[in-house]
Image (cartoon, helix red, strand yellow):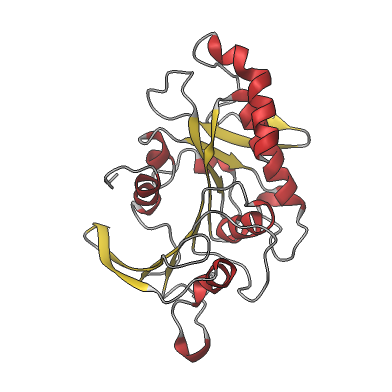
């Protein structure tokens, strides 16, 4: 995927050099891509030339990308941090993530390639996220096309933990509510609460976890963090909270701040 992006960037670079990039598809206006489409939202105060980190975010069930680019817990996080938000539209407002070989993986690859044609993309900082069914789709995507992904940021949705992935992101971050009954919290054998990231722990060859302590960005929600830093490759971060099925306030922004080397802030 990175090679494709670089080739497209080389073709599109003269357009970037002329000044701020203007395109008719933006925000609520979808970008057509064959028979499908996606939405894109630029960060605040972008100069039209500086290369942009990208957050590819898969929407939840019965939603579309137009909600993602105006969602305060998603779009506000990217807008404030210089990150380009990309939100593909699923067929029938859903995603096919249940088994390997999903056509949605190829579609997402095509979306990123098209984004690289329209914008100067920082190919070293491509992040993939999703919520609920979209969280599971994010897992499926990086499992099959994640070697060039800097980090997975999955929220309240995953795939089976006993499968093997052909590819993997540089690191995986997952958040889940213990009381989630929509995409049930996946408790492992013996009541193992770290099971939601068992797939990546095995794929990366991780040793014992390290408690990351409790943290919060809003006073009414405390998250407990566990990290796996001693791995053959990669890094795993698991944040758990006592709530149900939702995007925790500030979680996406906090992860982006850490990944971008910024002091974490809210919002």
**Residue 221, image x, y percentages:** 28, 64
Question: Above or below — where is 35 with respect to 239?
Answer: above
Question: Above or below — where is 29 with respect to 265?
Answer: above
Q: Is residue 184 left or right of residue 110?
A: left
**Residue 217, image x, y percentages:** 26, 55
**Residue 178, image x, y percentages:** 41, 75
Q: Is residue 50 left or right of residue 16?
A: left
Instruction: Residue at 67%, 48% (x, y): give it.
Output: 90
Q: What is the quadrant of the C terminus in the image?
A: top left
Identify the residue at the far left of this view. Answer: 219
Q: Is residue 156 left or right of residue 241?
A: right
Question: Above or below — where is 227 with respect to 37?
Answer: below
Total numbered labels: 0
Identify the residue at the far bottom of this view. Answer: 190
**Residue 114, image x, y percentages:** 67, 31
Instruction: Residue at 61%, 12% (x, y): give it.
Output: 14
Q: Nearer the viewer, residue 243 or 240?
A: 240
Q: Can residue 242 be seen in this snapshot?
A: no
Q: Can residue 212 be seen in this snapshot?
A: yes
């Amino acid at each position: 995927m990175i090679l494709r992006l670089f080739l497209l960037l080389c073709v599109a670079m003269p357009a970037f050099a002329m000044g701020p990039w203007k395109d008719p598809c933006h925000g609520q206006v979808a970008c057509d891509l064959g028979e499908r489409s996606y939405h894109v939202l630029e960060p605040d105060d972008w100069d039209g030339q500086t290369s942009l980190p990208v957050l590819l975010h898969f929407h939840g069930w019965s939603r579309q990308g137009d909600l993602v680019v105006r969602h305060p817990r998603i779009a506000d996080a990217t807008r404030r941090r210089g990150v380009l938000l990309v939100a593909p539209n699923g067929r029938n407002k859903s995603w096919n993530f249940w088994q390997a070989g999903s056509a949605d993986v190829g579609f997402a690859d095509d979306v990123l390639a098209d984004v690289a044609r329209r914008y100067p993309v920082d190919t070293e900082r491509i992040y993939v996220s999703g919520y609920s069914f979209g969280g599971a789709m994010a897992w499926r995507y990086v499992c099959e096309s994640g070697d060039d992904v800097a980090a997975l940021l999955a929220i309240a949705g995953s795939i089976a933990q006993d499968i093997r992935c052909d590819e993997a992101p540089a690191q995986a971050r997952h958040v889940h509510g213990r009381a989630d009954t929509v995409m049930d919290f996946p408790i492992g054998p013996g009541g193992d609460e770290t099971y939601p990231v068992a797939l990546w722990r095995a794929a990366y060859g991780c040793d014992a976890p390290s408690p990351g302590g409790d943290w919060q960005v809003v006073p009414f929600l405390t998250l407990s963090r566990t990290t796996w830093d001693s791995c053959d490759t990669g890094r795993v971060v698991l944040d758990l909270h006592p709530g149900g099925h939702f995007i925790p306030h500030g979680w996406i922004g906090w992860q982006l701040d850490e990944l971008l080397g910024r002091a974490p802030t809210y919002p």
